[in-house]
Amino acid sequence: MKSLDGAATVVDHGGSLGRARALFPHAPQPFVDLSTGINPHSYPFFDLPATALARLPEAARARELADVAASAYGAPSAANVTSAPGTQILLPRVASLASPGKALVLGPTYAEHARAAAIAGHAVTEVDDFEVLAGADLAIVVNPNNPDGRIIARERLLALAGKLRAKGGFLVVDEAFMDVGPRAESLAGDVEQGGIVVLRSFGKFFGLAGLRLGFALADALTVERLEAQFGPWAVAGPALEYGIRALADSGWRAEMRRRLAEDAARLDALFGRFGVSVAGGTTLFRYIGLADAAGLFSALGERGILLRHFSGRPHVLRAGLPGPDEEWQRLESALADWAQQRDDNTKEVKQ
C-alpha cells in the first residue's frame, strides 16, 4: 500500500511539447509524440453549423448526445449518462459522491484519480491487491488499466460494487480505453444497480482530445446529482456536434478498432526487431519493461521521438502509436541508432 497526498501532487503527464522542447532542446522537430494514448487517426473533421459557435448549446442537443452515448457505450438509457467537458473535470465531482473517508485506488495507474479523491476530502491509498478494495468507502479501478493494460473481469467488479453499495460506498471504474478493450467486461450496462460510476473518454479513441468531451454513466439519481454540479451549457456546441456524429458512426468505430489492432501489432514487431519486448497495453498504447528504459527514452527523445516515462517506475515506458508513414520511419531510424549504440557499448565492455 502507498498513501498518497494527491491534492499536493503535481502530476507529470505525457503530451506536453513545451516540456519536451525543454528536455530535448536540440531534437529535430516536429516531435513525434508517442507519449500519449490518443488515437493518431482522428475522426474526420466536418463543417460545423454556425449555431454551434454563435449560440449557447441547446438542451435538446445535449439530450441527443446523451441518447447517442448511451447507445454507443451500452448504458441502460440516456438518463444514465451525464456529459462533461472531458472526464478530467468529472474526477473530483465523482469522488465527492462518497462522503469523505477511505479512498483506495488500484494501482499503479493514472495518477489523477488519487489527486481528485484527495481534493474531495478522502484519505487516499494506492493498493496493488484488488481484494483490499472492499475495505474502501470509495474504490477506483481503471479498466483497461493505464499504463499496463490490465483487465479486471466484470464479475469481480460487480461483486466489489455490491459490497461497497451495502455500506453506502461507491465503485468508480474508469473505462477511458474500453473502446479498444474487451467490451464484455464493461460495467456500462450495470450502472442502474447503483453505487457504480463508469467514466468514458471521447477524445482518446476518436483522436480529438482537444475537443474536451467525456461522460459519467451511473444510476439516474446519481446522474442528476452530477448534472446539478455543472448547471446548463456544460458541454460546448462544437463538442456536442462532434460527439453526436462520431458516437453514432458505428462503421467508423468498427473499422478503427481493426486499424488500431494492426498498428499495435506493427509497433510490437518494430520494437521486437531491436530487442525491446512489449509487456502489455492496449491497441492505443504499448507497455514496455526495460532495464535501460531511461536510456531508450533519452536516445529517442534526442531524435525527436517522445515516449512516456514514469518518474516512480524507472524501468517502465509507454509508447503510443505513430500516425503517418514518416513517423514510423523516424521511429525505426531512431531505434536502429539506439540499438547500434547499445551493441557498440556492449562490445566495448567485453573487450
Image: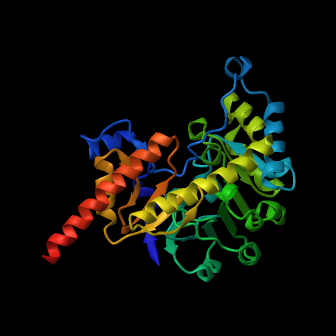
* Location of residue 337 (image quadrant): bottom left
Dividing the picture into quadrants, the one containing residue 190 is: bottom right
Q: Residue at x 32, y 50 (%)?
A: 301
Q: In this figure, what is the number of numbered marks?
A: 0
| Residue 236 appearing in the image | no
Q: Nearer the viewer, residue 72 or 85?
A: 72
Snapshot colouring: rainbow
The image position of residue 161, as x and y in percent, is 73, 73
Instruction: Point out the residue furthest to the left here.
Output: 351
On the image, the x and y values in percent for residue 49 come to 74, 20
Q: Is residue 225 visible?
A: yes
Q: Position of residue 11 (x, y in %)?
A: 42, 54
Q: Position of residue 106 (x, y in %)?
A: 56, 72
Above or below for 241 versus 311: above
Asked if residue 5 lies left or right of residue 262, the reply is: left
Q: Residue furthest right?
A: 77
Camera-side residue of 227 and 30: 30
Q: Nearer the viewer, residue 100 or 107?
A: 107
Which quarter of the rendered picture does the C terminus lie within?
A: bottom left
Q: Is residue 347 left or right of residue 176?
A: left
Instruction: Please state if 211 lies on the left or on the right of 276 as rendered.
Output: right
Q: Residue at x 71, y 49 (%)?
A: 226
- Residue at x 62%, y 39% (from the top left corner): 42
